[in-house]
Image: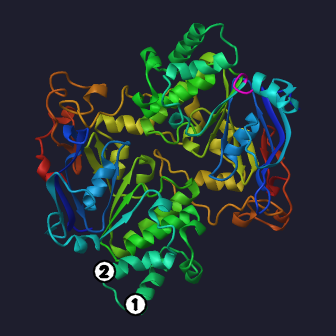
Amino acid sequence: MAGDVLLSVRDLHTWFELRRLGFVRVGWVRAVDGVSFDLLRGEAVAVVGESGCGKSTLAKTILGLHPPTQGEIVFDGRRVHGTEDLRWYRSRVGYVQQDPYGALPPFMPTQRILEEPLLINGVTRAEERMRRIRRILEEVKLTPVEDFLHRFPHMLSGGQQQRLVVARAMILEPQLIVADEPVSMLDASVRVEVLHLLRGLQARHNLSIIYITHDLSTVRYFCERVFVMYGGMLIEEAPVDELLRAPKHPYTQALLAAIPDPDPANAARMRDVPPGEPPSLLKPPAGCRFHPRCPVAIAGVCDVQVPPHFQPAEAHRVACWLYGAEREAVPAATFR
Amino acid sequence: MGQNGILTVEDLRLHFRTTKGPVQAVDDVTLTLRRGRTLVVVGESGCGKSSLARAILRLLPRNVHTYSGRIWLNGSDVMTLPEEQFRREVRWVRLALVPQGAMNALNPVLRVGEQVAEPLVVHGRAASVAEARRSAAEIFRQVGVPLDFLDRYPFELSGGMRQRVAIAMALVTVPDVVLLDEPTSALDVLTQANIMNVLKAIKRDMGTSFILITHDIATSSEIADDAAVMYAGQIVEASQAAQFYREPLHPYSRALMASVPTLRETKTLGFIPGRPPSLIGPPQGCRFADRCPARFSRCSEEPPMVAVEGQRQVKCWLYA
């Protein structure tokens, strides 16, 4: 995989204004608060975090569904937002939603669902549209194709619905897929099938994938790199094996320790869980946003200054003052 | 039968009436929960596991086609009790349920302390409202909710705290058995670990017997003493947890276990092709046969429950 950057996100902020009575501004919900990263062509990365950490807002901002409050998104060398060619961008980026049934229009059969994006993007010849619909249905293994063309979403199983959502995301042959919890609504036995499918498409089409999830146990089977998000910020980044083997941030460590593998020995012990709740994005704590829950917080440092990204190992970045002494701080703008 | 466990379910059957024919949601289920232990029932969506919980608590909808079998609670068959007596003496007194999504179904206009104290008042278990409140406070302490939360409303609580309140509601009458239906599936990883810690502590301190119904095999191992696997309305395997998580027997249990991603070891994940059969007129023989990699001619007949290695039971011809 060459160092060919497809998507570059710089200092991205997505804040939502909170008003009372419709006009008095009460404050800002800082859902995404200073996120920077580069995504390579053909690379799959995971963004992992708990609910309310801003990961879905990050996905939607990247998709152009929320305007960024500040910062920029550069795709394939072109600045995305504020330009007139949002259609150009959206035809190159596919979106796989969390709830397949909610994401599919209930009154449209499969053929119509897949035809819509082609019509919007000016594929005028009917034979050409059908050719592409057939090809994509075969790729997502909704075969025999004839059986599925005229079925409505409610006539499909959960796994088939999600494969149709993937087919719709893929029909314009995008370069990037943003998958927001694509398998969290599915049963375990189907989940693996959909992840295999996405991984296969990625390899065949040299796709880049941003996989948003709360489930760290699936990332090892799916991604090259992992970003951990907490309180609207990326707090750690590493290759997947390294992150699972040697997590650096105390939050990442706590998260990994809390996830059980199926093992009868689990029943014999209590798990260590950091106290408290994730921070409010309306009034985030000063300094490191994890410091009120952190067992190793340094008084006078962690509660005062926001930690920059340190590099404790090759390709491993972490926003934690514990690693401040080891290396020079890497400015956030070059975070990758 | 019925004497060796605190709760024994025998040939429990719950079929629903629909225009297309009866749905065999729970079909001849036999289970034993031993005192002070936790029985985990795992299964995928639509396998009938929530219907099983409702059948045990006799919380039935109107379209019941068949409801039969025996439920022994502490040695007496509660199935034979008339509805009014069951409601007064069994449901929520000796047998409580934390339904799926209970944390989102709390009454939004009642303080959570009142909601938790309510079962005691309704069942006449407390001499006064003040006494019920004291019991509620005691239960709050057990499940790790700060006492000043007694006077809060549900919207003021986080998801993890609301789930603890839902568990407190089931525990406040000190029932013999508590059924938990997917108690952690809507929660975050850290909150999930917290709730499992709470359940472990309750089990240790109060000796409550639990039935945990879930699709999440990894999380279920946090508290399981015994495990049962449900598929298409039937129990296909029942084992002690120590054996089950290391080496499941039924081909379905094996395939299900192979599809669970693990954090600490790399393995090749498998999936199960096809989909579960319809519970309206399911296949005659083994209900998993269509998807089973090990099927053979005999699988067209219904397999019996076979005892394996003494304690284990599996509904599969491979072991007959």
Q: Position of residue A138 (x, y in %)?
A: 50, 79
Which stretch is magenta? B90-94
Give the answer, above or below, for where A301 lies relative to B231. Answer: above
- Tell me if I can see residue B254 in this picture: yes
Give the answer, above or below, for where B152 lies relative to B234. Answer: above
Give the answer, above or below, for where A275 lies relative to A253. Answer: above
**Which residue is located at x 42 percent, y 15 percent?**
B148
Residue A244 position by quadrant: top left
Q: Amino acid at mark 1?
A: Glu
Q: Which residue is mark 2?
A: A121
Secondary structure under the numbered disc 2 in the rendered image = loop
**Which residue is located at x 45 percent, y 82 percent?**
A133
Q: Residues within 10 Å of mark 2 (few under 14, many from 20)?
A: few
Q: Residues within 10 Å of mark 1 (few under 14, many from 20)?
A: few
Same chain for the residues under marks 2 and 1 in the image? yes
Q: Quadrant of the C terminus of chain A?
A: bottom left
Magenta highlight: main SS: loop
Q: Which residue is mark 1?
A: A128
Q: Position of residue B132 (x, y in %)?
A: 60, 12
Q: Position of residue A42 (x, y in %)?
A: 30, 68
**Which residue is located at x 62 percent, y 8 percent?**
B128
Residue B122 position by quadrant: top right
Secondary structure under the numbered disc 1 in the rendered image = helix
Q: Amino acid at mark 2?
A: Asn
Residue A6 highlighted magenta (yes or no): no
> Gap in Å between the C-alphas at discs 2 and 1?
13 Å
Which of the chains bears the disc numbered 1? A
User: For the image shown, how many numbered marks are present on the structure?
Assistant: 2
